[in-house]
Structures are given as C-alpha cells and as structure tokens.
Amino acid sequence: MAGSEVTDIATPHVTELAPLIVLLPMIAFAVILFLGKVFNGNPTWKNAVKEGGIIALGVMSAVLVLSLLLIADFIGSVQAGHDSVFHWFTSGVWDGTSAGVSTDKFGFGIYVDHITVMLLFVAAFLCLLINTFSIGYMNTDPINDNRNHRFYAEFVLFCSGMLGMVLADSFLWLFIFWEIMGLCSYLLIGFYYERPSAAYAAKKAFLTTRIGDVFLMIGLVMLWDLFGSLDYTVVFDSANIEHVAEHSAGTLQWALGLMFIGAVGKSAQFPLHVWLPDAMEGPTPVSALIHAATMVNAGLYLVARMFPFFGAEALHGDLADLAYIIAVVGGITAVMAAAIAFVQMDLKKVLAYSTMSQLAYIFTGLGCALYLANTLDWHHNDKDHYIVIVAFGAALFHLFNHAMAKGMLFMASGSVIHEVHHAHHHLHHHDDHGDDHGDDHHDDHFDAQSMENMGGLASKMPITATAMLVGSASIMGLPLIGGFWSKEGIIANAWRVAQDDPKFLLPAMCVLIGAGMTGFYMSRMWLKTFAGKPNNEVAAHVGPTNTWIKIPLFLLTFVSLSSVFFAGMGFTHWAPDENYAFMSEKSLVDGIIYEMGHAFANEDSYFFIITYIAIALGAVAGPGLAMALYGGELEEGESAKPWMMPVIRLNSWVKARFNFDNSAFAESTLAVALQNRLYIDHYYDMAMLKIVAGFSTKAADADSDVIDGTIKTIESGSQSISEVVRSLTTGSARDYILMVAVGMLAIFMLVWGVA
Amino acid sequence: MSETQAFSNEFYSALLPEMLLFAGLIALILIPNLGKGTFRIPGTQLRLPWFLGGQRFGLTSNPRLPAWIATITLAGAFAAVLDSLNGGVESLLVVSSDSDAAKELLMVNGFSRVFELIFFGALALASFASMNRLKVEGTGGKLTEDQLFNNRRQADFYILMLTCGLGMSVVALAQDLFVLFIGLELASFSTYVLVAFMKESKTGSEAGMKYFIVGSVASGVGLYGLSMLYLWSGSLQFDALALAFAETGTEPLPLIGIGFVLVGFGFKVSAAPFHFAAPDAYAGASSPVAGVLATASKAMGMVGLIRMLLIVAAPESSDGSAVWLVAIGALAALTMTWGNIAALGSTNPKRMLAYSSVAHAGYMLAGLTAIGAWTWDPSFAGQEGEAALLVMTALMFHLLVLVAFKLGAFLVLSILENDGDSSRLSSLGGLAKREPLLAFAMFIFMISLAGVPPMAGFLSKLMVIMGIVNVGVGSGINSFGDLHWVWWLALLMVLNSAISVFYYLRVAVVMFFEAPEKGREGPLPSGWQVRASIFICVAATILLGVFGDSVLEMCRDAAESLTTKW
C-alpha cells in the first residue's frame, strides 16, 4: 500500500510453496483432460474417481491447505510481501528517446498483502466447496455422463486462473489470469453447447466481458507507459507515483478509468451487465463458482488493487472524479438489478440479479472509500485514517460476506432444482432414464428452475431451506447475520461522503433504497420456494438432497452465521490496513461489543438515523411486503424445522392480515419493462444489428479481398520463389561444386571490396 | 590458465572424455569378437583360454551389444564433461614439449567443454535411438549370410559414431589449424560413411557419395587455404596467425587463404551457397544420422568459423572493420533467406528440416557478424561488450538447445522410417491418432524450431536477436541512421522467423488434422530406446526454455573463456 515498505515474507518456505497454489490446478487440468480422454466410460473412472471429480477435489483440498498455510504465515508476520518466484529472462529494451538500453524482467512473482490473503481464502475455500457440490450435482445426472471430465478440467483451470490472478505480482499477470478465467467462463457457460441458448449465452458472456477487457488492456498499456512497468512493487512505489503525479495525474486517471471498465465488464455492472443473467444457462455449480463466488469478484479485486493510487499523498484529490464514477455505476446497478429481480420467476435468475445488485453495493463502497482516501488527509490525521480504513474495510468485508452467502444460495438453489427435477421425473417418467435435472430444459416444457413449480419445500428439504434462509438473511442484511455488518458499513459510508459532497447523494440514496428492495426480492424468493402450499404435484413430491451437496451448504451456513465473530475480530480494520496486527487491539468479546455498539447505538445521530432507516427498509419493510404477497401456511400436517417455523407463522399471519392484490402491478408497464430487463438487451441487439452488423459485413469483405488477397498473393508468390530456389538443387554433385565455386568467388569479391 | 605437455597425467585427466571415447572404440572393436578361443602352449597339452576367436559367447554375439557399448561410452563421456563443467572450468593448454619452441596443440576450457557437451549429447542420443532404427536380424538359430552380415555391420556403424565424436572434440580443442583439420577430417569421413549407411534405399548410397564428393572438394579448398596461410606466416598456430594477421592481414595471400578456409567451414555449417549437398544428404541418411549432421556436425563447423573469424582474423583494434564482415553478413542474409524459402515448398519432412537447418545456420552467421562488428573492446566492458558477449552466449546456447529439438524431430521421423517411409509430408498424417504422445513431441519440436515461447528455441533465438540489436544500437543512438547495419540482420531474422512458422506448423496440421496414408493406420513400430531419446529431447526443450538460467550461465562462462587469449 501507499507508503508502506514491501518486504520479503518472514518465513520463506510458505511463499516457496505458494506457486503450487496456481500450478497444481493447472497440472490437474491437463491430467484430468488426458485421463478423461483415455478412460472415458471406464466404470472405475466413473464411479470411484467421479470422472475426475475426486482428482479435482484432492487438488483443491491441497490448494486450500497451502492457502491457509500462506495466510497463517502472513498473519503471523503482518507484512505485505513480495517474492519473485520465477525469473525467466531479462530483455534489453530500447526506449527510443533517452540514450541507452534499459532492461525489463520477464517472470512471475507472488505478491501477498491483506487483500490478496482475504480473496485467496474466499477463492480457495469456495472452489473446494463448489467442487464437493459438483460431485453431488454433476455426477448424478445421466446427461453429463462421459463428459464430466471436461467439466472438472475446465473447473480446475478456472480455479487456477482465479488463484493466479489473486496472487500475481503485476497487473500484466493479473490480466493474463483474468483472461484464463474469461476463457473458462466461456467454456463452462457453454458446457451444454448442443443447446442453442447455452451456446448463445456463452458467446454473449465472452463478448460482453471482452469489451471491458479491451479497455482494461488499453488502460494497462497506458499505465505501463506512465510507469515503465506493471509490477505492483514499481507502480505502488510512492516515489514513482509522486513522479507520475507531477506530470500526468490526468493520464493516470484515464488509465485507471479504462481499467475500471474492464472491472465493470467482469463484475457485470451497468452497462455491461447483460451477460450475467444469460450465463445461468451453465450448470448450477458453474453459476455458483463463476457468477457468485469468484470470477465476478475479479473486477472488485482490480478496483481494490487501485487503492494505493487513490491513497497516495501525491495524487491528493486528483482521482476524486473516478471514485465518484465508480460509486455511481455501483449505485445505479444496485437499484436497477434489484428492480429486475422483483419480477423474475426463475430461481437462478433472481440470484443472478441479486449478485449484480450486491456487487454494485461493493462498488459503491469501494468508490466511497477511494473517494475518502483521495480527498482526506489520512496519512497524518488519525481520525481520517480510521475513516478511510473502515470504509475500505466495509467494502472488502461485504465482498467476503457476499461471496460466502451467494455461493451458498446458488448451491442451495441447485439443490432445489435438482430435487424438483428428480420429483418431476419420478412422477411423469416412471420408465425414466435417470434423474437428469434442471439444467436441460425438457421437451415437455417443465421448467425445474421456475418458482411456479415450487412452494412449501421447507418441510421437505430442511438443510437446503435453512441454508437458503440464512443466505437470504445475510444478503438482506438482517441484523447480526452475515452481510448486515458490511452492508450497514457501506450505506453509512456512502452517507458520510454525501455529507461532505452532495453529489454523492445519488449513490447514497441508491444503496439505501436498494437495501429495502433487497429485503423484498430475497424474501419473495424464499417464501415462494419454501413457504406456502406446493404449487403443483411435483413440488409435493420433492425429497431431501444428497450428502455431497449437504456438506458445503452446512459449512457455509456456519460461516455466514459467524460473521459477527469476523466483525468482532476486526476484519474491517484488518483487511485494508497493512499496519494493523490481527486481533491486536481488542479481544474477541470486546470487539463484538464494540461493533454492536457502533452498529446499533452510534453516538453520531446522523449515522444512528441512517442505520435505523436501513434496518427498517431492509429488515422490516422489504420482507414485510414480500410476506404480505407471497408464501403462507405449509400444507396441513407438514412442519418445517423449529427454527424456520417462526418465519412461516409470521408469514401466514402477515399474509392473512394484509392480503394485497398485486395483479394491477403485475400488468403495469413498469412490470413489463422489468420483465424485459428494461429493454437494455433489446437495445443492444438493435445496435448490433443496425450498426455493428453493417460494419462487420464491410470489414469481412475487406478482409477476404484486401487482406486475405494480399496474403494469398504473398503465399503463392513465395511458393513459386521456393520452387525456383529448390530447382537449383538439381541433384547433381557437379552443379553443387559449381555453386561452391560461385560462392567462393563471391566471398573473395566481398572481402576484396572491404580490404 | 595452466600449461601441460601432451601425454602427461594432467593431459589424461583433462581429456578424460576423449580417453573414454578411445577406450570405447577399442572395446567396440574387441568385445564383439570375444569367444571361447583357446591357446595351446607349444609342446604341451595345456590349453589356455585367450578369448579371441572360436565360438562366440552368448553376450558377445548379441548384435545389439555394439549399440549399447557406444551409447554408454558416449553417455559416459557426456557425464564426464558435465562433471568437469560443474563449478567452472580451469583452462588448460596442452603444448607439444617443454621447450620454448613448443607448439600449442589443444586447449581445454569452458568453450571446448560446452561444445563437447553438444557433440557427445547429440551422438549419445542418436546412437541410443539407432538401436531401433538399425534392424537386428535375430540373435540365435540359423541366420542367412545376409542377416549375419547385417548384424556384423552394427559394430561398424557405432565405431563410426565414436570416431565422429572423437574428431569433433578434437576440432573443439584444437589450437593449431593442422590439428583442427585432422579432427575435421576424422569427423567428416565418419559422417560420409554414416550417411551412406542406410542401405534400404538407393538414395542412401547416392546421398553418401554426393556428400563425400562435394565435401571433399570443400575440404580440399579449405586445406588449400590452410597451406596459403602457412606459406604466408610460416605457422599454423592460432596465436601466431592472429599476431601475423594483426600486422599484415590485408595482404592478398592471407585474405585468399581465409576465404578458402571459409568455404571449407561454410560447407560444414551448410551456409548457402555451399549447402546444396546437405538436403540430399539429410534425406538420404537414416534419420538419427541426419540429426547428428544437423546438430553436432553443424556445431563443429561453427567452432571452426569462430576460431577462424574471431581469433585468427580478428582486427587488433575495436574500429569495427573486420575484413570479412560484409562477406559473412551477406552470407548470413543469403543463407537464412534461402533456407526458409526453400523449406516453404518442400514436401519431404527431412528435406524441410534440412532447409530449416540451413536457415538456422544463417541466424548463427548473423550472430557472428554482429560480434565481428567490433564496436566493443575485448574486455567486454560497457554495453557494447556486454552485447557481444550476449551474442556469443546466445550462439552457444542455440547450438546446445538445437540438439534437443532438431535431433528430436529427426528421431520422430526415424520411427516413421521404420514404419516404411518418411519422405512425404503425408507420411506424418494422422500421427496424433496413431501415437498421440509422439505427435505431441513433434509439435513441441516444431514450435520450438519456430521460436514459440516458452520453448528453448524461443529463448535462444530471442537472445541472438536481442544481442544483434544491442550491438546495432550500441551505446545509444538518436535516429535510425545511427544504427550499425547489423541491426538489419536482426530484422531479417525476425521476418525469416515469421516465414518459417508456416512450414513448421504445416507439420502440425498434417499430424493432427489429416488422415494417415493408406495402409499406415496401425500402431507405429515399437522400440523404447528411440522413444526414451525423444522424451529426453522434449523434456530438455521445455525445461531449457523455462529454466535455462544455469545453462545460460554455463554458456556465458564458456563464451568468456573463448576470449581469454584476446
């Protein structure tokens, strides 16, 4: 971070092992793909090795262990560390202007600081859990038979990309791994490539993120031009930043702004958000992996990595505009995505829009934190320092909470879909071929992902329902659970900035309203799925899920519930601050008491009011409205687990008390517009057809006539030259000797000429 | 640097690899003849076994035995060189006597050691792989005369491999043009016969004959050049020649002499227009032998050129005016372009590889030209000296890694030769289906030849180009006009590399996307030795490309040791 010394990590053995975190999955990719090709269809491969699932599981467990070792080592030493792992070669670079040749190093290194460590844990932990889930989900489905090895191979390659991106020590390697992830995301979304909608979704995701990536690349090139390097150690060096700030602070803002567009694409923010809902075409573990837990966090990570620029003293106030843009993009997306989520009937799409909206929260949080870092004198003023750190920490903490909760929600939704489909098959195809589930839309048009086909599942799938309940509560920010701690922080900080700078009222209002909207759509989703009476015969016959799926749900429920302990341990202070020793200032109990007091009894009345408005909207108004509209009593004689019964009783009471009729709204223009995703996809398609397609046709013609024509001419030309040259090789030794003589004479002439 | 006399103890220990080769040579001649022969002490009935003649033992009658002896000998020599390289090499000069008039004969230093490594490595891999290439016609029972004859020929082949290695290492060690010539001819004659050794097809003997005729003309011209140099300076010692050249180097006699010598070595490195016999020879020889020609033999020619151009004909001041600069520069440009253009249209994989090897010779000549630009002083001080050292290092590294991927490619073709034929591009068809690992290996070799990261071929080519560019740029320039013209050779190299990608990748296209030829769909002939050799080559290609640091360090030390006499 700005101003801090980057030192080598105290105990080198762990950093030596760190490259394995990236390398192991990459090797596993090749191994699984190769073995899959060789042993495809072999019963041992299929049943004992789960078509590579067990290999992937082993590798991901090893990765988690290594990551934990690295994290433990890091927490022990509390120093940002940089370690060049592998130095390939050094190249002379002629820079054209100043005399001489500078050198540039090529290689790969590991960079570890608080942000790395946090995201490393998130990625490694969730990848392992999702891997476990996949074994229960993918391998029980006949439609995947004999191609699961492809899934697992792409899965581990994806993990390698994510982990590599987190650990990389330069923006260049970050970009390389970023693109590996992009590739895997394309492959995994299009896993059922025989289905046109999946192929379309894969292409859409790839192309949309590509737009962002092009900007990211331009931004990186500009950054390289400014600093002469993309290594973190160079670009974050305060002396270098000072040097750049003197002449080209504006250019730096543009470079970072372009990089931010890359993050917008990767994290599905407005206006590059259109790919995420369609990407739900991929198998559910993919949705959990890519679209909730890891890949979408890459954009956030990139923005968080920019903190040293914003925090640099030399750039004081220069980057405030960019910070505002980040916050506004986040605010708009938060409200827009939440609104679209209101009307979605597809379980996974609700979650997709929720992801978009929550990521937007984090962007707003980051934007505010970056703004504070850029405008406050936080290097010298302790109070300002605290404000900046806590604002940044809240955003990072929400990243953590959201990843855990959303990963769990996706897996739980997968579990629901899996079982609904199973039940459907059980009922309608007694002579069926197995239990292929929700990911393939059947010809009889039964949609296992639609909440129309669910309802009252709380009694039938206790673990899934509990997980979903805790996950929803965490996303909604229900007091004390999961995302509450971080979301309150983000909202409070947005309002803190708005206090200083009125133009921040826009994002601040957005996140406040968004909190209420989140409360509504998450409650709606849970109630429609788990409460009330089964909507049809299928939902009445759903059974519990299998162990592979239960394990990750159980673990993540536990993590989400223990969020209060993370808060108490000072996560929000530790995550962004390189000088903050882990658990050094307060004991756990003191920490929890402090956080509680801070959240519920803030001495500053401004924040006190904001907090309670947020709680009132997110935890009372939103869920209350949803309860009045959806859900209700379970089927008679059925009962859920005791901890879910109060929710259901409250729901039925509210529903009976205020029996709203929302049919008027359902037919309104707004609802239709929301159904159509505010027509944004529609406009994009139109623009594509009208402008881009016309241009593309011209470009294609130019390509085939001019460029290909030239190349073909060169090719045929060089082939004929080649014939001439080779025809000199006559096969007769006499001619060869003649040529030797000719060559000899030529040498003489040349030597003579010089001498 | 220490000095010792020939045949002293130090001499033997320093030349351990050559001694091993010599011992292996004797073993190769003797061991296959060991039998139950006995010797009767005259006048008595006592018969003493003396093992020569009579019925041969089971082991010694095994026709595979010579191959094993040769491979183990060469591998042992390789290991001995590697061992002596470990921790730096102390330069040792071997002189003919302890008198003042003693002649310098051989020099053991980092430079010669690295080249020994190249020679023995290539030969060891080739002879190991040849175990599968040369047919053994049964080991027991009744054999026809032809079969017996074929089995006996095994020993001849491997004896030639060893003499070839011995000759090459003498070239690398020589400090005297005459010693160098002896080594050159020993190696050359061995290769002529090795090329003609492939008897399955007529092309083998024809190629061998052609290679011999053109080669002996080139050698004759070279020898004539040597005699002119002797006539001029009265000595064939590198030292003496270099001194004399610094004084009166621009007289016609030494210039003509050096021109003639260049022709001789130009043939060895297959520089255009002396390369014409090379494609025929490569195509006619059995593939492992062709691999040796393309790697070890070429490295030997490069040693000769380096000695001749950078030691003997080096100008004494750093004024950038070596007399041969333009000639070698032109030769480099012609060679790389010719090689690549001819390879473009070549449909015979072995000829294609031969032309590609011509192109690689052009790249190396371009490197030599850059060093010869003499924009630096002999102590390698400053950026210019650093650049020259970089080119030299890169050249040695390139020759070293060439063994991995060029020989490897030929070894893959040798399996196809056993399968019937490898003279058409289509004979590689469907290799990916027939034996995926082999196709993968060939693919690695091809992209390494083309210079794709992270293969070894990328690193070596990049360093040569980088070195030339650095020499061309010198200590800083302000415009293109200030560039030394060798910079354009680097540009030409880049353009040529772009052309070459076409024909290298065409091999991959045929292997992965085209169907096998009719009747060749089945599995390839077995043989673990050749596959093991290929595996070693693949591993070296990748590992040296990624973790080449220590080897580069070694080459750098070697490059510095070459110039201890400057």
Image (cartoon, coloured by chain):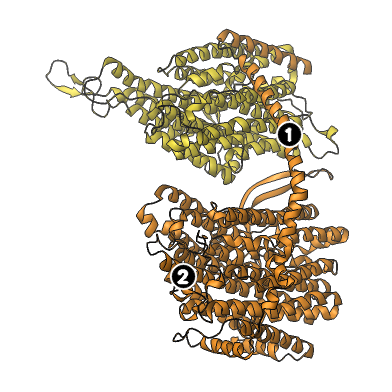
Chain colours: A orange, B yellow
Does residue B416 appear to the left or right of B102 in the view shown?
Answer: left
Tell me: residue A215, above or below residue B456.
below
Q: In which quarter of the image is the C terminus of chain B?
A: top right
Query: Which callout, 1 or 2, points at the residue further toward the start of the chain?
Result: 2
Residue B323 in picture, x, y percent from top left: 74, 21
Kindly identify the residue that appears in the image at 45 percent across and 60 percent down: A53
Residue B121 in picture, x, y percent from top left: 48, 33
Kindly identify the residue that appears in the image at 61 percent across and 17 percent down: A726
* Mark linked to residue A707: 1
In the image, A181 versus B564, the foreground residue is A181
Q: How many marks?
A: 2
Tell me: residue A267, above or below residue A91.
below
Task: Tell which subunit mark 2 falls on.
Answer: A
The answer to whether any part of residue B415 appears in the image is: yes
Residue corresponding to mark 2: A419
* Mark linked to residue A141: none
In the image, A410 versus A366, the foreground residue is A410
Determine if marks 1 and 2 fall on one subunit: yes
- Rendered image quadrant of residue B393: top right
What residue occupies the far right of the structure in this picture?
A: A247
Task: Tell which subunit mark 1 falls on.
Answer: A
Does residue B438 appear to the left or right of B558 in the view shown?
Answer: left
- Rendered image quadrant of residue B37: top left
Q: In which quarter of the image is the N terminus of chain B?
A: top right
Q: What element carries label 2?
A: helix
Residue B118 in picture, x, y percent from top left: 52, 32
Q: Which amino acid does label 2 sit on?
A: Glu
Kindly identify the residue that appears in the image at 71 percent across and 92 percent down: A601
In the image, A330 versus A444, the foreground residue is A444
Q: What residue type is labelled 1?
A: Ile
The answer to whether any part of residue A76 appears in the image is: no
